[in-house]
Structure formats: C-alpha cells, structure tokens
Image: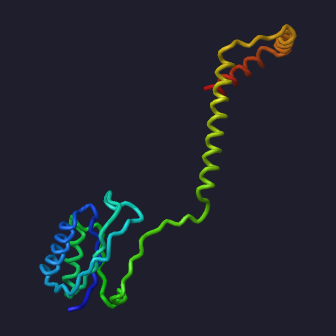
Amino acid sequence: MRLYELLYIIPATLAEEEVSQAENEIQALIQRYNGVPKETRRLGKFKFTYLIKKVRHGHYVLSYFEAEPVEVAKINEALRIHEKVLRHLILRAEEAGGSEFNLVQFQEVVVEGGAKDDRTRRRKMEAEKSKAAEDVKVAAELDAKPEEKTEDEEDSVKEEAEKISPEELDRKIDAALTENT
C-alpha cells in the first residue's frame, strides 16, 4: 500500500453540517475501495478564480490515505462523479511535496491600466455615441427637407446631361443601380 494525498473542493453553498457530512462520505468512499484514511484537514474557504459549476467559493479539504494503485483509480472515478465534490486531485504523497501545504487567497492583479484608463475609455465611448447621434440627426434632417437648387445649378446639370451620349448615360445609370443593390 502506498500513501496518497487527496485535495478536494466542496461547494461553500453547503451548510457547515453538510460539509462535515461530505467529508465523512468521502472517507467512507475511500474505505469502500479498500483504502485506509490517515488524516484529514480543512484548509479553509476560498474564492475561485472563475465559476465552477455556478459556484464562486469552496471549502478546500486535504486528506491522506493509504491504498493500492488499482484501488486509487476507482476512488478517483468515484470522486469524479460525486455530487458534493467540485474538483479533486489525488497524488502520491512523495510527489505532493510533504505535509507543508499553504493556500493563498486569489487576488486579481491589474498589470496594465486601471480605474483611470477605464474612465478615459468610457469618456471616449460616450463622445463617439454622442457624435453618432448627431450624425443620425443631421442625416434625418437632410432626408426630411428636399434639396433646393439654384437656377445656375440646374443649368449646369442640364448642360452636363446634354454632353453625355445616351449609351454612356445608360451605363452610368446601370452602374449606380448595381452599387445601390
């Protein structure tokens, strides 16, 4: 038999009695597969870096047990489907690094930027939104009122139309229609 270390996480949504009951269930599971539980310690309640099964916090529990390698695979599989275990890890005690085990609460570190950058970005976005709103308003006003042309503009349009051959005019119309569709 070899000595193994089991680290598992129980959801913090459970009450204290339910956490104790889950620990007892896991000890019973180890015994069911011919393992011999040695020691169990609660390492504390910690916030996860990301949600695990829609849970934000969990109780970390460290347990030592002796078992045959064949039985450890069965224990691992049983823990994988256990409803009260969010995550777990089984290692040989020699690989795990001994009895010294410290968990540190996750703290998010912002490498670049910060609150100042966030405010600047918000101001830029608000300025862009207001400019876009103004552009939409101006476009709506232009669409609403018909264009009034002076007599000189009308004369220049007529002169330009007279210079173009009917075939060229048809090509320009077709090109304009294909661009719009």
- Comparing 107 with 32, the one in front is 107
Q: Position of residue 96 (x, y in %)?
A: 35, 86
Q: Horizontally, is 59 left or right of 142 in the view?
A: left
Furthest residue in direction front, as rendered = 16
* Quadrant (top left/top right/bottom left/bottom right) for the C terminus: top right
- Comparing 153 with 88, the one in front is 88
* Quadrant (top left/top right/bottom left/bottom right) for the N terminus: bottom left
Q: Position of residue 46 (x, y in %)?
A: 36, 69
Residue drawn 31% across the image and 77% down it: 43
- Image vertical order of residue 177 relative to residue 119, above or below: above
- Image vertical order of residue 108 relative to residue 97, above or below: above
Furthest residue in direction top, as rendered = 151
Q: Position of residue 3 (x, y in %)?
A: 25, 89
- Comparing 40 with 2, the one in front is 40
Q: Which of the 4 image quarters holds residue 62?
A: bottom left
Display coloring: rainbow
Q: Which of the 4 image quarters holds residue 100?
A: bottom left
Q: Position of residue 44 (x, y in %)?
A: 32, 73
Residue drawn 38% across the image and 66% down it: 47
Q: Which of the 4 image quarters holds residue 93?
A: bottom left
Q: Horizontally, is 148 left or right of 45 in the view?
A: right
How many callouts does the rendering have?
A: 0
Residue drawn 85% across the image and 15% down it: 160
